Every structure is written in C-alpha cells, then in structure tokens.
Image (cartoon, rainbow, N blue to C red):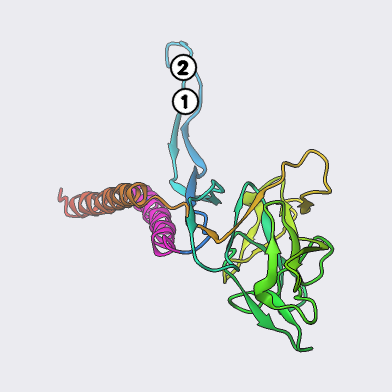
Amino acid sequence: MMRALYTAATGMIAEQTNLDTISNNLSNVNTTGFKSERTEFKSLLYQTIQTRTTSANGAEKPVGAQVGLGTRVAATTSMYTQGNLTETESDTDFALDGDGFFAVRGVDGQTYYTRNGSFTWSIAADGSTILATKQGYPVLDRNGNTITVPNGVSAEKMQFSQTGEIGYYNNDNQYVPLNQYFGVYQFNNPTGLEKLSNSLLEATAASGNPMQEGTTAGVTNSKVCQKRLEASNVSVADEMVNMIVAQRAYELNSKAITTADSMLETANNLKR
C-alpha cells in the first residue's frame, strides 16, 4: 500500500509540471516568435517482486513479477514549427520564413538568437542609429557587427531584401547596397537551445554550433519578410485538450492515493 502512495505521488508531481508547461504555452499565445513546448515522461525503476523461476512441480515460469514505481518528467521539448506570418505597418518588423534565427548581442556582449523580429531603430552610446530589439539588444549582421544607419542617411531610407541584404536609397532615389546582410543562423538540433527571457535563445552543446546561412554549405536559406511578424505556433484548441487530459491524470493519481489510504486505514482497524 505504501508503494501505491509513493507511485501515485510521482504521477501528481509529473502532471503538475505538465500543467505548468501548458500554462506557459497559453500565456505566450500572443508572443511573437514563441515556440510551444511539450512535456515528455519516462517510467521510474521497477521493483522485482518475483523473478523468472520454476514452480513447485518444476515447471518454468516464463514471466516474472515487476511493479513500476511511478513516472517522472524526462524533458520539455520545444516544437520549432513555423508560425503564421502576420502583416504589420512597421518597416522594422521582420519574420523569418524558414529554420533560421536572428542574432542579437546581449548586455554581456554574448551572441543570442531569437525568432522575434519585432525590431526598432535605437540610438547607440556613440550616437549612431542601430537596429535593435524592443529591449535594446543590437541586431547583428553576418560578421557579428551591428546594423547601423550610415551617416547622413535617414532611417526611413533603409531597405531590406528577402535575402537579408541591407542597403538604402540616396537623395537621387538610387539604391545603394551596404554589402551587409542580416545574421541568420540555423542549428542541427534547435530543441537543444536554452530558452532565456525576452524571447532569447542561447546555443548549447546539445544544440550544436550555429551555422550561418549564406556561407554554410547545405543550409537552406530562410526568407526575410519585412513588415511581417511570426505569430506563436501555440494551438489554443490543442492546449485546452492537453490541459483537460493533464487534469484528469492528476485527479486519477489523487484518487489512487485516497484509495490506498483508505485501504491502509481498513487494515489498521482489523481486529482479531
């Protein structure tokens, strides 16, 4: 009976984590570039009650008796499927149609990655105008440099192509390329990226090294869509169903604990 209490408790703990993940998905349903997460479980150790042996008359028992000791959370996997592209009115809104990630520089000077292309023009410490996230993190090009508006050029004159090329129109309305491209990167295992706040992602050993689009062989380039934002790929209907399933599983494990407790009470009250 005590085994049932512990086993059911592990189920309740695991389902609580599952519900936490579902809640996070629903809370980010309107977060640009957010990727939904899924909780995965694995079974715990099994206790051997009876090994495969022979019966009293010598007949072999081909199957032993093992009792599972519950479940635990194995991983929380991010689903990097493409979200819908929504049209906006801002020239500094960008969406990636493909598997790439924008590169930005954090306050610690390290490079981070994001699918959230809601950028804006910002004034840097040296007075130059740079492309940055809403939190002020500079957006980087292929060479790891900030994307800066040239001196004497209005930010409204800046031009961005679907290939990620950056240029501007001069006073004669002629296009002038800057020989600069968006820094867009891919990973062999994007689910291995570590999620941080502000929609930022950090490369890890599990994700592999970033592969720069445009310079890495075998990598299909993403399309840079200006005046577009990638919506969250969270499906509200699916998450509501998952929430109901998690709630029912939690209630079942709770009922198992109540039942085991009742059986223990009955056993303790037995009189000779």
**Badge number at residue 254:** none
Q: Which residue is mark 2?
A: 61
Residue 258 found in image quarter: bottom left
Q: Is residue 138 above or below residue 61?
A: below
Q: CA distance from mark 1 to mark 2?
A: 7 Å
Which secondary structure, mark 1?
Answer: loop
Magenta span has 240?
no
Q: Amino acid at mark 1?
A: Gly
Under mark 2, the amino acid is Lys
Label pair 1/2, CB-CB below 8 angstroms:
yes
**Residue 1 appears in the picture as rendered:** no
Instruction: Name the residue rendered at 59%, 67% in the picture.
Output: 91
The residue at the point 84 percent across, 63 percent down is: 143
Residue tagged 1: 64
Q: Nearer the viewer, residue 5 or 150?
A: 150
| Left or right placement of residue 65 versus residue 268 in this view | right
Near mark 1 (Cα within 10 A), the count class, few <14, some 14-19 or many ≥20, is few
| Disc 2 element | loop
Highlighted range, magenta: 3-30
How many numbered circles does the render carry? 2
Magenta-drawn stretch, dominant element (helix, strand or loop): helix
Residue 201 picture location, percent across and down: 64, 62
Is residue 51 shown above or below 101?
above
**Viewer-side residue, 226 vs 265:** 226
Foreground residue, 105 or 180?
A: 180
Q: Residue 58 at what x, y percent from top left?
A: 47, 11
Q: Position of residue 205 (x, y in %)?
A: 75, 54
User: Looking at the picture, does residue 135 appear above or below residue 126?
Assistant: above
In this orientation, does residue 127 appear?
Answer: yes
